[in-house]
């Protein structure tokens, strides 16, 4: 059979036709999937695609199909993806997103990704408007009490996304269609709904509705999440790069001798009044006030997530042996993977990156020992559901405030691992690593802009970083303790922060070694500063 493929069957019954599914799941679909930005298997070899589930997304006789594709890889694992499809006959339409040329009952046309169709987006939105409170059908639409719209007006793609597809509806809402899906509720849906509906946490886009499917194994799979659209001034990553660039420019403006800048101890709690006048004079007061606001919003998120005693998915738990075994297995496997990556790609490194990588390899047993040195019996704090992938890119800036989003969790982790309760300081460690990145990215992206040697800029950057951390941490800890969230005593907090930051930096090392080896200096420096930090954790 050659394209265009011909079937004497109505669109509404097409998926029941074995001849069609055979043609559809052929290399044509494989080639289409491989080209998509949301496809996450590019580093593996695709073997074949299966269609374990399909369902109708319909209203008043208008029918589209939602497909759950199972992508099988040569390396003996698989991933699931969501693809909604439509049949269009307009020659001019969706040229980039055509999957298959087709003749249905004599009508020529194409199968395309339905998200390109205004009619499909309108249908989904109207199904959410009319959602029943206790939907028990296979395809479930749910709406929040906060969602009060009664008519569809417009929709458009949100743009620059990688792993999901977001559509702006009526210029008031965002529907995020999850592309990579799991046989469980998506953490982004769970956390968003819990924070905004149950805890009325104000600094995340409010939950408005969702679309899910009950599969043949009775698993509840989240397909889409709708939230309010938050007008904003961009994300905190871009904001921070701009601020740090200003701070580095002021080194020259104020003729600062980098080597005379006063230093502080890593993780020392600092009020703004504890920050030396030379540092305030250099960096400005404004950035520290902003860091206090971000620390408050982070603490408030953890207070909301850590003060639940009914819903078991969110009730706090103590550390225990099972958690310790899970954590160590995971981290030792990841650490070994990163060691292999550094050894195999060492020749790509030069200068400071090479020096630090050499030290990393020489001291691998010491680092491994730090991971093994997790003893749950010494820990008094609690574990809660956390953001899990918290960094400056997951925070929106709006006027003088911050809003937290994207609760899907760490992309490399399984869905089960993303829902494991963790110390809240894991999120704090994530944002600290993000501060570190922002400082180094500013230096790397503005080569030659500041009249200082790279070594001096790194030195100034490390000093700035310790003050950022100290001011953030003081505000965070104060608010957490006022609300009786148990994050452990002082030495325990330092131990957990170092442990989680070491984990995060090792995780980052894999990405940098594979995509931009010269930036490996950032995670390597992070790893070494923790290993060299003389504070030893003792009870």
Image (cartoon, helix red, strand yellow):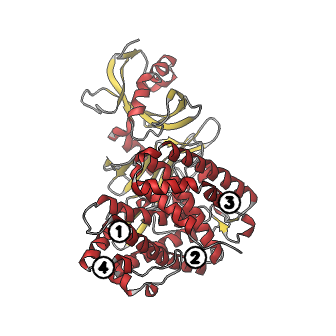
Q: Disc 1 marks which residue? A: 457
Q: Which residue is drawn at 62% across and 47% down?
A: 333
CA–CA distance in space, label 2 to label 1: 34 Å
Q: Disc 3 marks which residue? A: 312
> What numbered label is drawn on residue 480?
2
Closer to the chain start, of discs 4 and 3, is 4
- Pointer 1 with pointer 4, Cβ within 8 A: no
* Residue 162 appearing in the image: yes
CA–CA distance in space, label 1 to label 4: 12 Å
* Of marks 2 and 1, the one in the foreground: 1
> What numbered label is drawn on residue 412?
none
Q: Disc 4 marks which residue? A: 256
Crowd band around label 4 with a 10 angstrom C-alpha radius: few (<14), some (14–19), many (20+): few
Closer to the chain start, of discs 2 and 1, is 1
* Of marks 1 and 3, the one in the foreground: 1
* Position of the N terminus by quadrant: top left
């Amino acid at each position: 059979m050659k394209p265009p493929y011909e079937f004497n069957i109505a669109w509404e019954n097409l998926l029941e036709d074995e001849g069609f599914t055979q043609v559809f799941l052929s290399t044509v679909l494989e080639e289409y999937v491989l080209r998509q930005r949301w496809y996450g298997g590019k580093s593996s070899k695709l073997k074949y695609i299966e269609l374990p589930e399909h369902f109708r997304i319909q209203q008043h006789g208008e029918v589209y199909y939602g497909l759950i594709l199972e992508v099988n890889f040569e390396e003996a694992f698989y991933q699931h993806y969501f693809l909604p499809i439509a049949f269009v006959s307009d020659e001019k339409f969706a040229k980039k997103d055509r999957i298959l040329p087709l003749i249905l009952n004599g009508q020529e046309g194409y199968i395309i990704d339905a998200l390109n169709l205004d009619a499909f987006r309108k249908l989904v939105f109207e199904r959410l408007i009319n959602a029943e409170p206790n939907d028990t059908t296979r395809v479930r639409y749910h709406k929040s009490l906060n969602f009060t719209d009664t008519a569809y007006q417009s929709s458009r793609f949100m743009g620059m996304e990688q792993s999901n597809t977001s559509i702006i509806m009526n210029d008031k809402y965002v529907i995020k269609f999850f592309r990579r899906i799991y046989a469980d509720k998506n953490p982004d849906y769970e956390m968003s709904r819990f924070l905004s509906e149950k805890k009325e946490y104000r600094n995340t886009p409010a939950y408005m509705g969702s679309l899910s499917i009950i599969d043949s194994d009775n698993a509840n799979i989240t397909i889409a999440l709708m939230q309010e659209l938050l007008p904003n001034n961009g994300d905190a990553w871009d904001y921070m790069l701009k601020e740090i660039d200003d701070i580095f420019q002021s080194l020259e403006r104020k003729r600062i001798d980098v080597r005379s800048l006063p230093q502080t101890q890593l993780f020392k709690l600092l009020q703004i009044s504890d920050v030396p006048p030379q540092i305030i004079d250099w960096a400005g007061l404004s950035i520290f006030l902003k860091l206090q606001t971000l620390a408050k919003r982070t603490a408030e998120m953890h207070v909301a997530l850590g003060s639940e005693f009914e819903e078991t998915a969110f009730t706090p738990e103590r550390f225990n042996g099972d958690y310790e075994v899970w954590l160590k297995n995971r981290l030792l496997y990841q650490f070994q993977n990163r060691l292999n990556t550094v050894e195999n790609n060492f020749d790509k490194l030069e200068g400071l990156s090479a020096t630090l990588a050499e030290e990393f390899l020489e001291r691998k047993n010491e680092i491994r020992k730090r991971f093994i040195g997790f003893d749950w019996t010494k820990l008094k704090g609690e574990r809660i559901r956390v953001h899990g992938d918290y960094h400056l890119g997951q925070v929106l800036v709006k006027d003088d405030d911050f809003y937290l989003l994207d609760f899907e969790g760490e992309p490399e982790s399984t869905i089960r691992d993303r829902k494991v309760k963790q110390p809240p300081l894991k999120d704090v460690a994530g944002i600290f690593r993000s501060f570190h990145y922002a400082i180094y990215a500013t230096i790397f992206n503005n080569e030659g802009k500041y009249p200082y040697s790279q070594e001096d800029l790194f030195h100034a950057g490390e000093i700035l970083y310790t003050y950022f951390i100290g001011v953030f941490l003081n505000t965070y800890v104060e608010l957490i303790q006022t609300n009786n969230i148990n994050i452990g005593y002082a030495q325990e907090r330092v131990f957990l922060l170092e442990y989680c930051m070491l984990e995060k930096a090792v995780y980052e090392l894999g990405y940098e070694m594979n995509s931009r080896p010269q930036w490996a200096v950032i995670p390597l420096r992070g790893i070494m500063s923790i290993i060299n930090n003389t504070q030893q954790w003792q009870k």
